[in-house]
Image (cartoon, helix red, strand yellow):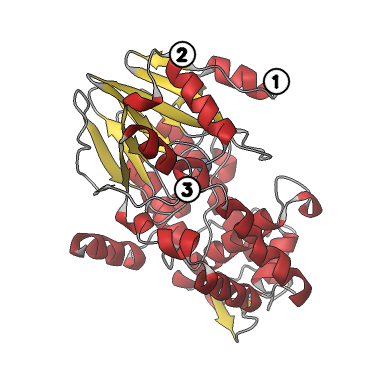
Amino acid sequence: MAKRDDRFERRTACACGTGLARLRASTVRTMISVTGTKQVEAWDRGVLPPVESVRPGVWSIPVPIPANPLRYVLVYALELPDGVALVDAGWDTPEAMAALESGLATMGAAITGVRAVLVTHIHPDHYGLAGRVREASGAWIGLHPADASMLRGRYLEPEELLHAMHDLMVDAGVPGERLPDLNAASMVIRGLVAMAEPDVLFEHGRRVELPGWDLDVIWTPGHSPGHVCFYSASRRLLLSGDHVLPRITPNVGVHMQQHPNPLGDFVESLLAVRNLDAEEVLPAHEYRFAGIADRVDEIVAHHASRLDQIRALLEERPGSTAWELTLRLSWSRPWEKIEPFMQRAANGETLAHLVLMEIHEQVRREGTNPARFYLTAGAQTPASTTGARTRGSGSGT
Ligand SMILES: [Zn+2]
Ligand SMILES: [Zn+2]
């Protein structure tokens, strides 16, 4: 516990925007190469990819996510001398369990042979089914303590969290008529989780006890406070969970169950995996790929560009609330087509950028309920506005 707190202090105090300052969106081109060619073909056709042997001893099993643009989570099954270990599990739905069982059958295994479920983080598409798998097999479940400590407050007794999230949204400037909708959005997802306390708590830098495997835990907070990746040096493999995905970036937002500077954490966590000698990255969504350093640079540049956009918007309209900024930022789909849960996540993501700018003294907030944001004198660019969206780097120096 003490170790975790030390690291947490270091993270919140450090100049986490270093990477953001170095990189500009316009100068970075993605150099990743897709190794999951069947997965990307299936992605393009809008169907589930096949269960595949990724390399000796590692299988990829797509487990469907209901009514979600991500379509599936990729569960990885690692062969053990006496069974199988899973990295992530899927949602708690009968369809997900059936897909997992069928995938295990394809590789010649069975749910009863699962010895361990290594969960990258608390989100329902990764952790939701872990409890059922344990019931069926007696497997142990592993999770990072920072996520384990949030389980009860999120899935069993969420009232306090709901109140706190309500207050957070009022302070962000969410209009009263949208509050019930946005606040209730997460409750639907709660039904897709079988609450299960972990048996093993992962520690950063420690090796997971799995016979025949040298999987090391890399703590990568940002998307979730207890997100972890797993790295095998001998196989040159990185199991990246949601931390590094080939095409999209994970939501990194201010939330009542988050560290105070999630975007700063996330960038530092990206730099923590950037230089690993990983021949291939096995992400939890989309498709597997090679080129971790290039993908990390691209994600960092994306956030740097996002900071530029927010700076430009605040130059145009000083005193905007987080919600007003969120409505004016560009998103992957038209705002009205984004479901309430993701609108709330988008607002949290805007706040995460604002918090990072506050830490770098580029932004100050005034007032509460709602808080209004202003650029500091040091962050303002010369009077012209036309170049504002492309001028300046994403981080204070
Ligand atoms: Zn996630
Ligand atoms: Zn996910």
First reached walking from the N terminus: tag 2 or tag 1: 1
Taking the image as shown, residue 155 lies to the left or right of residue 13, namely right
> Image quarter for residue 151?
bottom left
Q: Which residue is mark 3?
A: 194
The local crowd at label 2, few if under 14, some if 14 to 19, many if 20 or more residues have their Cα within 10 Å, is some
Local packing at callout 1 (Cα closer than 10 Å; few below 14, some 14-19, many 20+) is: few
**Pointer 1 with pointer 3, Cβ within 8 A:** no
Q: Which residue is mark 2?
A: 106
Q: Which mark is residue 309?
A: none
Q: CA distance from mark 2 to mark 3?
A: 25 Å
Would you place residue 179 above or below residue 34 in this image?
A: below
Q: Choose mark 2 or mark 3, whichever is in front.
A: 3
Q: Are marks 2 and 1 in contact (CB under 8 Å)?
A: no
Residue 78: horizontal and vertical position, in percent?
Answer: 33, 24
Q: Quadrant of the N terminus?
A: bottom left
Q: Callout 3: helix, strand or loop?
A: loop
Residue situated in front as seen by the camera: 385 or 173 = 173
Where disc 1 sits, the SS reads helix
Q: Residue at x 25, y 65 (%)?
A: 5
Disc 1 marks which amino acid?
Arg
- Return the residue at label 1: 45
Give the residue type that dot 3 points to: Ala
- x 48%, y 44%: residue: 128
Q: Name the quarter where the C terminus is drawn.
A: bottom left
Residue 157 is at least partly visible in this image: yes
